[in-house]
């Protein structure tokens, strides 16, 4: 495997563990915590040999990835998903909220009242050969010139170059009472061949498989595309006409695309004068549907600054820690920028480890002080 980015990070962590003979059990879910005298003393783990009792000397760190695949908690906390099913997460399928549930069972509390219970991302659903589909996250394509997003009303609703978290909130808001919260990303032929769109790759990869499996919709005219997608055709034609008039000058007076460094970073520097804005005029035209998804959940267990899980009244539950998305996000349900999940996950994992090992700031500075 080519190890880059997150794989490289975890590869190095795994090497450190292997070098120290730390056992790593895969496909071994934790089912329950062992509590004695009010303190967490271990866990029951399902292995292929049955349930194994693991006793700890110092404590247990919950890090089961939050609840992106927990339909019941999604129903409770995602306002756009009244049954929990109206949401498609690209997070690992095993992140079903076990850690938070285990913490709650011994007195922990998930944080409440966040403005957003997760970091949102628009996803398109890529059909698989077996009839299922996989959610593809749209991070970059929305920022390219010549891409706009409309709801079924045929109208744009936001600066498409803004972050995925902001985009989804705007999309949900624009859909109003419509039970389906969705939008279509729209491009013309030169744009899709240059940048691709979602799971569709740029030239020379053929478009045909994506058209055949229904992922990508095509229309010889804007009207035909709108009719195929179920978008209001007249309003859509008007939207594109208005957008194009300004886009030919590199302007977007309606939503000010290209007005921030974030916008411009995701644009195309060769597109002048605005790296984020280009007209949609040379058919055929294409659309990919996007729906709400997430990168990870924010509403984890409440902890103290040492990553120790606390109960309703703020008392520490001895022996229990949480890190990653099992811990309530320190961002308070907001998404100031990329890295706001992995950064705190690493930081509080490290803090939890040091606290469990009894390493204090004083002991570190004493041992690291150079000899006189
Ligand atoms: C496509 C995508 C792109 C992203 N990009 C970024 C980015 O650029 N920057 C950033 O900061 N964040 C990013 N994120 C978010 C980030 O990857 C996650 O928030 C982060 O990995 C969560 O870490 P975690 O340790 O909480 O959970 P995970 O890394 O998901 O690990 C949880 C593990 O627990 C296991 N597990 C679940 N239940 C049990 C159980 N009962 N017993 C034992 N194990 C269990 C799961 O199988 C999983 O292996 C991205 C997420 C996605 C989906």
Image (spheres, helix red, strand yellow):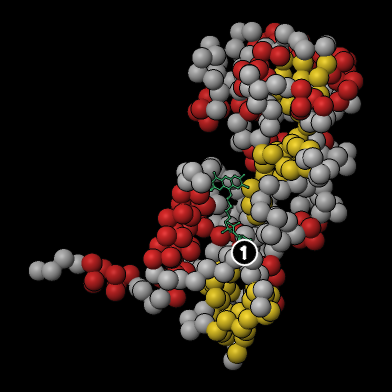
Please provide percent x and percent y for residue 205. Answer: 66, 22
Residue 254 against residue 36 in the figure, above or below:
above
Q: Residue at x 68, y 32 (%)?
A: 199
Most distant residue in the left direction: 372
Counting the numbered discs, the total is: 1
Q: Residue at x 68, y 19 (%)?
A: 192
Q: Residue at x 87, y 15 (%)?
A: 224
Please provide percent x and percent y for residue 148. Answer: 70, 22
Residue 289 against residue 278 in the figure, above or below:
below
Q: Quadrant of the C terminus?
A: bottom left
Q: Residue at x 71, y 61 (%)?
A: 96
Residue 22 against residue 14 in the figure, above or below:
below
Tell me, yes or no, if residue 228 can be seen here.
Answer: yes
Q: Is residue 79 left or right of residue 228?
A: left
Using the image as rendered, state which of residue 290 and residue 160 is in the foreground.
290
Using the image as rendered, state which of residue 48 and residue 279 is in the foreground.
48
Using the image as rendered, state which of residue 308 and residue 284 is in the foreground.
284
Q: Quadrant of residue 147?
A: top right
Please provide percent x and percent y for residue 1. Answer: 51, 46
Q: Quadrant of ligand 1?
A: bottom right
Q: Which residue is mark 1?
A: 64
Please provide percent x and percent y for residue 225. Answer: 84, 18
Q: Residues within 10 Å of mark 1 (few under 14, many from 20)?
A: many
């Amino acid at each position: 495997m080519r190890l880059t980015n997150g794989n490289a990070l975890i590869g190095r962590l795994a090497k450190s563990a292997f070098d120290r003979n730390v056992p790593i059990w895969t496909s071994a879910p934790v089912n329950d915590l062992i509590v004695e005298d009010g303190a967490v003393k271990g866990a029951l783990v399902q292995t292929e040999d049955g349930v194994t009792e693991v006793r700890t000397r110092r404590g247990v760190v919950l890090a089961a990835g939050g609840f992106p695949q927990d339909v019941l908690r999604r129903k409770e906390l995602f306002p756009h998903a009244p049954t929990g099913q109206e949401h498609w997460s690209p997070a690992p399928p095993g992140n079903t909220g076990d850690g938070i549930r285990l913490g709650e069972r011994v007195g922990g509390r998930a944080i409440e009242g966040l403005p957003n219970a997760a970091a949102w991302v628009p996803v398109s659903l890529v059909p698989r050969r077996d009839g299922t589909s996989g959610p593809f996250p749209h991070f970059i394509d929305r920022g390219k010139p010549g891409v706009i997003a409309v709801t079924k009303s045929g109208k744009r609703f936001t600066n498409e170059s803004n972050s995925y978290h902001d985009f989804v909130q705007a999309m949900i808001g624009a859909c109003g009472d419509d039970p389906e919260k969705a939008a279509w990303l729209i491009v013309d032929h030169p744009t899709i061949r240059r940048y691709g769109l979602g799971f569709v790759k740029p030239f020379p990869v053929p478009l045909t498989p994506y058209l055949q499996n229904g992922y990508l919709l095509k229309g010889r005219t804007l009207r035909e595309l709108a009719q195929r997608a179920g978008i209001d055709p007249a309003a859509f034609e008007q939207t594109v006409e208005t957008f194009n008039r300004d886009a030919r000058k590199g302007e977007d007076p309606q939503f000010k695309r290209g007005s921030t460094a974030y916008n411009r970073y995701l644009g195309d520097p060769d597109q002048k004068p605005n790296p984020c804005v280009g007209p949609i005029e040379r058919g055929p035209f294409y659309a990919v549907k996007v729906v709400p998804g997430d990168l990870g959940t924010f509403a984890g267990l409440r902890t103290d600054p040492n990553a120790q899980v606390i109960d309703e009244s703020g008392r520490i539950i001895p022996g229990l820690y949480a890190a990653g998305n099992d811990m309530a996000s320190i961002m308070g349900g907001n998404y100031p920028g990329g890295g706001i999940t992995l950064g705190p996950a690493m930081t509080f994992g490290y803090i939890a480890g040091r606290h469990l090992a009894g390493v204090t700031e004083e002991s570190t500075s004493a041992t690291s002080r150079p000899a006189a």
